[in-house]
Image (cartoon, coloured by chain):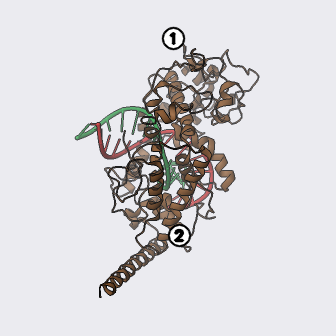
Chain colours: A brown, B green, C red
Amino acid sequence: MTMPHMSSGGSEDFYSTDEVKVYKDEGNKDEEKRSSENLTEEKLGLVTESEEGKNTSLQANFTGSDKSSNTVSDDEKSTSGPAAPGHGPPGSLGFFIPPYASAYPNGAAKFGMVQPPYPGLVMYNDFAQPPPAHKGYSPVYTDPKTGLPRPPMYAAYPAPPGQFSHPLYSPEFTGASPWHRPGYPLTSGAFAGSFPPSLSSLSRYGPPSLLTHPGLGHPGIPHPASLGAVPKSELMSPQLLQDSHRQLNSSSHGDENSGCKSSHHGGGSGEETRKKPYVKKPLNAFMLFMKEMRPKVISECTLKESAAINQILGRRWHALDRSEQAKYYEMARKEKELHLQLYPGWSARDNYAAHQKKKKRKKDGSGGGSSGGGSMGSSSLSPMGGSSSMSSGGHLGGMCMESDSKSGFPFSGFSGECPNEKKCRARYGMDQQSRWCKPCRSLHEKSDQALVETDQKNFLLVKTKEEVHTL
DNA sequence: AAGCCTTTGAAGGAC
DNA sequence: GTCCTTCAAAGGCTT
């Protein structure tokens, strides 16, 4: 499995590493018996502490001691997990092991066998293996208690004509995704009780026509699609529903993606766009998690800027208990299966072209970062790249922090003078400081210089002490 | 108006 | 097999 967020090594500047990944390695807690709540709190605390430490160091108090590393080390000690190979500074974590890598592979005993990841969700035998969706497994599950085939989880979609009836489409499961259908009440069933409300169902792919499945237990519930608030592109299947798609879009075919700007592809003519509904990628576990948690974070933190919120959510994701994460991985797998059912011929690649133009522009603008580590692509290596201060700056730590009213970013007083510096850094990264706005650049240089000077002072101080000592 | 920012995960192409 | 890139959501911000 690729670990796109691997740190580049020990020579990174003190705030450039992507500490978020620290928590990817918390899975090797073989002796972990604490409650998930406590664990979560502790993790959150660790995150916060770690990042506060960095913040401190940022404030010209860089003494070489890496508090975050220490923190992580402690965590690692407690987890008795092996140090991540190749991980730069000692104690700098092990985000080498992804949540599942740690939760499942070697953690079968601790995780899979102790209790199901969440009530109502079957403990699959292959929980000893990373369950990420792409791994896949048989769609037919067995209830460990009854030994019978597991009750299907989603009834929202009937099997497309000519396809086998997927358990997902059982009548026992009703409801539509609240993520995409905020107005579509969920009810039902065993599953609803097991998952968080928002997890109790899926999906975004349900065409209105399909959603009126005979098995739906709530015929009286108006489907959001009928409310007209849902991007039609999400509801249409190019293969199965082209006709209905045309029908529905006859009056607003040009507005297919009105509901989501990110899905609005500039490429292609309007006609093409009209005829080829845009099928979005199924959401992965984290996306599902974000969908559910975003409102909570917003209400708790009074933040609105998604970038900041996503950082918080990223922290929370890592702080999430394994079993909690398993819910979302499972949901993502379901979503993917459903997507596959609805759009058999669809490939994620299909959506690439739609954004080519945009990305090209982006690349061009970034000064020709043609390969790797470039503008957007940097996310594969280190999402933060040089701009990691945003995520590693310790402004979030999975907790609600005060945010700068102007930038909307959580603000913990890095400079106290120019909150936007973080923004420039985040936007362009450390390696593109030339693109920063002037105030930010000069400010950064100052603080950078201050750090260097402080570091030098500290070095000299130590040196002097040593010399005095030897004398 | 279009694109950026930010997060993680999945997928697919290139090597 | 590994690396890299793109896209998925979201909404304020920037250009």
* The C terminus of chain A lies in quadrant: bottom left
Query: Which residue is at a point 45% across and 44% down the rendered structure image?
Result: A28
Q: Kindly identify which chain the residue marked by label 2 belongs to.
A: A
Q: How many marks?
A: 2
Q: Comparing marks 2 and 1, which lies closer to the viewer?
A: 2
**Is there any visible trace of residue A81 in the rendered image?**
yes
Residue A282 sits above or below residue A402 on the image: above
Mark 1 belongs to which amino acid?
Gly
Mark 2 belongs to which amino acid?
Phe
Q: Kindly identify which chain the residue marked by label 1 belongs to.
A: A
Label 1: how many Cα within 10 Å (few below 14, some 14–19, many 20+): few
The image quadrant of residue A412 is bottom right
* The N terminus of chain A lies in quadrant: top left
Can you give x and y, in whole percent of width and height, for residue A164 in the image?
Answer: 51, 12
Residue A310 sits above or below residue A16 on the image: above
Can you give x and y, in whole percent of width and height, for residue A5 in the image?
Answer: 40, 49
Of A213 and A334, the residue lying toward us? A334
Query: Which residue is at a point 54% across and 29% down the rendered structure image?
Result: A335
Of A103 and A357, the residue lying toward us? A103
Label 2: how many Cα within 10 Å (few below 14, some 14–19, many 20+): many
The tag earlier along the polypeptide, 2 or 1, is: 1
Can you give x and y, in whole percent of width and height, for residue A458 in the image?
Answer: 39, 79
Residue A250 sits above or below residue A163 on the image: below
Q: Distance from label 2 to label 1 (Cα)?
A: 60 Å
Q: Do the residues indicated by labels 2 and 1 lie within the same chain of the protein?
A: yes
Which residue in the structure is indicated by mark 1? A162
The image quadrant of residue A352 is top left
Can you give x and y, in whole percent of width and height, for residue A142 in the image?
Answer: 54, 18
Of A469 and A268, the residue lying toward us? A469
SS label for mark 1: loop
**Is there any visible trace of residue A278 in the rendered image?**
no
Which residue in the structure is indicated by mark 2? A414
